[in-house]
Amino acid sequence: MDDALRAYGDGREDAFAGRRNVGAAEDPHTGADYRTGFLDGRIEIFRMLAEVREILEENG
């Protein structure tokens, strides 16, 4: 369980940093956890950017 959580966290960190660790993503034991964390991180970034755009549009 610890490995899965660590892989998920690593995936999120890599998404925030704008890089992807192919080796971690293809790991047979924790690759799915890494990819899920990566995707969750990318979605969070997308939402944050959408909020920034909305704020900028409101302030003209």
Image (cartoon, rainbow, N blue to C red):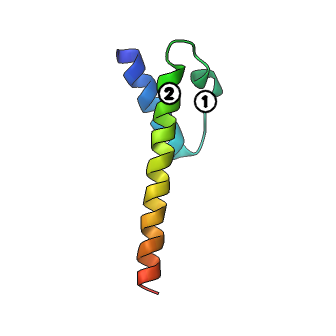
Q: Secondary structure under badge 1?
A: loop
Q: Residue at x 53, y 30 (%)?
A: 35
Residue sitting at the far right? 22
Residue sitting at the far bottom? 60
Instruction: Characterize the local packing of mark 1: few (<14), some (14-19) or many (20 or more) Cα atoms within 10 angstroms.
Output: some
Q: Amino acid at mark 1?
A: Asn
Q: Residue at x 47, y 87 (%)?
A: 60
Q: Quadrant of residue 28?
A: top right
- For the residues labelled 2 and 1, the Cα–Cα distance comes to 9 Å
Place of residue 14 in the rendered image (x, y in percent of width and height, measured from the top left): 53, 38
Place of residue 38 in the rendered image (x, y in percent of width and height, measured from the top left): 51, 36
Q: Give yes or no for contact between labels 2 and 1 (Cβ–Cβ under 8 Å).
A: yes
Task: Say above or below: 41 vs 45.
Answer: above
Residue beneath disc 2: 34
Task: Say above or below: 48 vs 30.
Answer: below
Q: Secondary structure under badge 2?
A: helix
Q: Amino acid at mark 2?
A: Tyr
Task: Say above or below: 22 vs 57.
Answer: above
Relative horizontal placement of residue 31, taking residue 59 as reference (left or right): right
Place of residue 2 in the rendered image (x, y in percent of width and height, measured from the top left): 35, 16
Q: Which mark is residue 21?
A: 1
Q: Quadrant of residue 40?
A: top left
Picture quarter with the N terminus: top left
Instruction: Characterize the local packing of mark 2: few (<14), some (14-19) or many (20 or more) Cα atoms within 10 angstroms.
Output: many
Residue 12 visible in this rendered orientation of the protein:
yes
Q: Earlier in the sequence, mark 2 or mark 1?
A: 1
Residue 13 visible in this rendered orientation of the protein:
no
